[in-house]
Image (cartoon, helix red, strand yellow):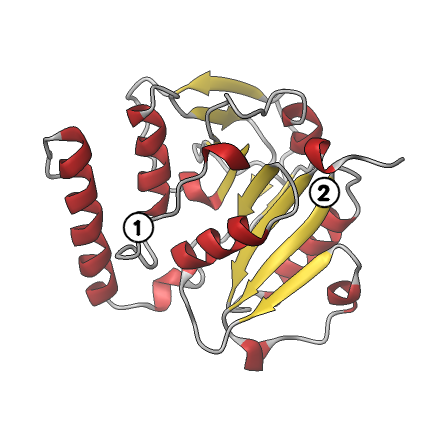
Amino acid sequence: MTVSKQESFTVVIPTMWKIKYLFAELLTRLCDHELVEEVIIINNAVCDTPAFDILNNDKINILNQGSNIYVNPSWNLGVLESKCDKICISNDDIIFDTTIFDILNPIINEDSPVYGLHTDHDNYFSDDKSSVYFSTWTGEFDPNGFGQLMFFHKDIWEPVPSGMKIWCGDYYIFNLGILKNKYPVLIRNLGWHTPKSVTSMTYTSEYWDNDHIAWKSWFVDKFNYWVDN
């Protein structure tokens, strides 16, 4: 079956190869799905690139970086280089039920909000999986973790500001939707699993402080207020 680029997905994944076995499983599942046209890997640790057979798959496009450009600039680069209208941004340390591509394919268009994972529970290995459903954000959910898995149309993307390197990119995308009156939609009861933050845990508080300053500056500029957590 041939799927047009208007009806297929580019998946963007930054990596430093910190958890190789899980990433290999994710890549295999993505390449096996007919709605995934391409997987763009932003390779921020070229010297650590493993010799995985899956990396030779025709769907995979590896963009090697001379040095680590960090996760949020990697998202910007991946979306810029993508072939497809529909984008998925994923962590490299997560596996998830790829039927979500089938569910979202008829829903996502240039007028859609961003859809992101609700991280209320990790149920990939559970036998008790409810059907996937969606809920529009109404203020009850802290978007921390939203950026582990997101889906949107390329036309709504605005690059993450350059001051945010590692953290706060998901907060930016989440609140950009609110600013445009396209309230983010939470993906609920999707089967997924992650050890979470395998790469970002290695960075010092200096990175968090700088990213948070840039995030706060953007937020105050757009919303004219700030509430300290």
Viewer-nearest residue: 180 or 166: 180
Residue 45: % across, % down: 51, 75
Q: Residue beneath label 2, please?
A: 36
At 69% from the left and 55% from the top, the residue drawn is 27
Upstream in sequence: badge 1 or badge 2: 2
Q: Residues within 10 Å of mark 1 (few under 14, many from 20)?
A: some
Amino acid on which disc 1 is placed: Pro
Please tell me whether mark 1 sits on a helix, a strand or a loop: loop
Q: Horizontal placement of 177 versus 31: left or right?
A: left
Q: Are marks 1 and 2 in contact (CB under 8 Å)?
A: no
Q: Quadrant of residue 118?
A: top left
Amino acid on which disc 2 is placed: Val
Q: Residues within 10 Å of mark 2 (few under 14, many from 20)?
A: many
Residue 142: % across, % down: 30, 33
Viewer-nearest residue: 61 or 227: 61
Residue 203, disc? none
Residue 77: % across, % down: 49, 56
Please tell me whether mark 2 sits on a helix, a strand or a loop: strand
Vertical order, 205 against 106 (above or below): below
Q: Residue beneath label 1, please?
A: 161
